[in-house]
Amino acid sequence: MRLVKAPRERAERVRKRISNMRALRKDVRIFEEGEHVFIPLKEGFDERRLLDLGIEVVDGDARSRSCYVSPYDQVRGILSFPEDLDVLLPQKWEMFGDVLVLRLPPGLEDVKQEVAKAYSGVLHARTVCLERGIIEGVYRTPKVEVIWGDGTETVHRENRILYKFDVAKVMYSSGNFPEKKRMSELDCRGETVVDMFAGIGYFTLPLAVHAKARRVVACEINPVAFSYLQENVGLNSVGDVVEPVLGDNRDLPGERFADRVLMGYVGTTHEFLPKAFDLVKPGGVVHYHETCPIDEWPQRPLRRIAQAAGGRRFEIGHKGEVKSFAPSVSHYVVDVRLLD
Ligand SMILES: C[S@@+](CC[C@H](N)C(=O)[O-])C[C@H]1O[C@@H](n2cnc3c(N)ncnc32)[C@H](O)[C@@H]1O
């Protein structure tokens, strides 16, 4: 039998990913051995899809080993809360490196320390934070409260890229993974790319590391995110490709020189479209992101693109949903190729 072998701290994330790929074999138990969790794979599944994500697959036999108890069930076992609290325990969480971010319902407020301790033990988290509101503002600074451990700076690994950042100071959207993966699968050899909203390198790094862009101009306005961007360029050994620029992307010099422009920002992205069109050269592509009510998709982004193009001819390539954003609102991306 083929089994995915995942380090314990990544196991739940890997299990979910395999399940989303419909590759999880459900008639055989998941089990753990030492520091690893072994997840049975369906027969005939194309394992290259996992290897591309840096996920290890081995041969093995499930029956001889002790069985796997999900982290959620382990936490429930440790806490043994009465029914009314037990049902409130979160079944989902975000793990960035060794920092865990939980969203707790108000009913668990009085026992938050106990809850954090249990989750940190089971998930091997150094620090536990609570999400305290939605991410807003130009800098996209998260609102979190540290309730267990100490230190919120961590190194998160995704798609064989290292992202160092401070979970309490800089946002990280794991929901954008499919789009980051799509960018990493482009062939950008020889290309000059401008990432207008670089953050800590969310899209810049996949484009430099995997898509092999020749040059990436990575612009970021928030000095905190910018300093992590600089560090991450070094951590991923792409200092000869990425040029981090601190400042407002509307001040970037140059016109019609970019083969590709990334607009990985939502809310007011359309206001930056004229600048993106100034930067992109004929034949180049703009990856335009927008959060849009589902019933206005795709008309609204297409209308905004046409307005900003101001008579320049363009064609639409890929267009689709990146993730659900709010009730009846999704985050979408549209690829626009400028023809002249
Ligand atoms: C955090 S990212 C958005 C999410 C990200 N694409 C992801 O995958 O998680 C957006 C970044 O754009 C930056 N930003 C906002 N306005 C900007 C501007 N005018 N020029 C340059 N950077 C800007 C913000 O500081 C933020 O770091």
Image: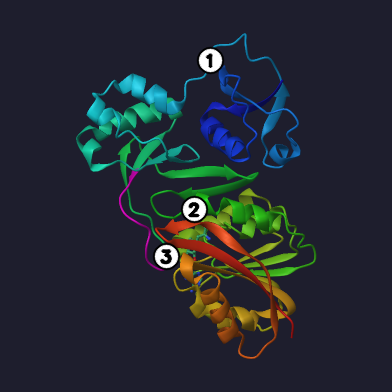
Q: Which amino acid is tagged 3?
A: Tyr
Q: Which badge, 1 or 3, comes first in the chain's sequence?
A: 1
Toward which corner of the image does residue 254 lie, by quadrant?
bottom right
Q: Position of residue 178 (x, y in %)?
A: 60, 52
Question: Mark 1 = which residue?
Answer: 67
Q: Residues within 10 Å of mark 1 (few under 14, many from 20)?
A: some
Question: Mark 2 = which residue?
Answer: 173
Q: Which amino acid is tagged 1?
A: Cys
Q: Position of residue 315 (x, y in %)?
A: 70, 77
Q: Main secondary structure of the magenta part?
A: loop
Q: Residues within 10 Å of mark 3 (few under 14, many from 20)?
A: some
Question: Mark 3 = which residue?
Answer: 139
Q: How far apart in space, not on screen, are marks 2 and 3 (Cα)?
A: 14 Å
Please state, as top left, top right, bottom left or bottom right, where the N terminus lies in the image: top right
| Up/down of 258 relative to 146, above or below | below
The residue at 63%/81% (across/down) is 277
In magenta segment, residue 267? no
Q: How far apart in space, not on screen, are marks 2 and 1 (Cα)?
A: 32 Å
Q: Nearer the viewer, residue 208 or 245?
A: 208
Q: Nearer the viewer, mark 1 or mark 3?
A: 1
Q: Which badge, 2 or 1, comes first in the chain's sequence?
A: 1
Point out the stretch of residues depicted in magenta.
Answer: 130-138
The verdict on label 3 being within 8 Å of ligand 1 is yes
Q: Position of residue 144 (x, y in %)?
A: 33, 49
**Left or right of 235, for residue 70:** left
Toward which corner of the image does residue 148 lie, by quadrant?
top left
The residue at 71%/66% (across/down) is 215
Q: Nearer the viewer, residue 163 or 293?
A: 293
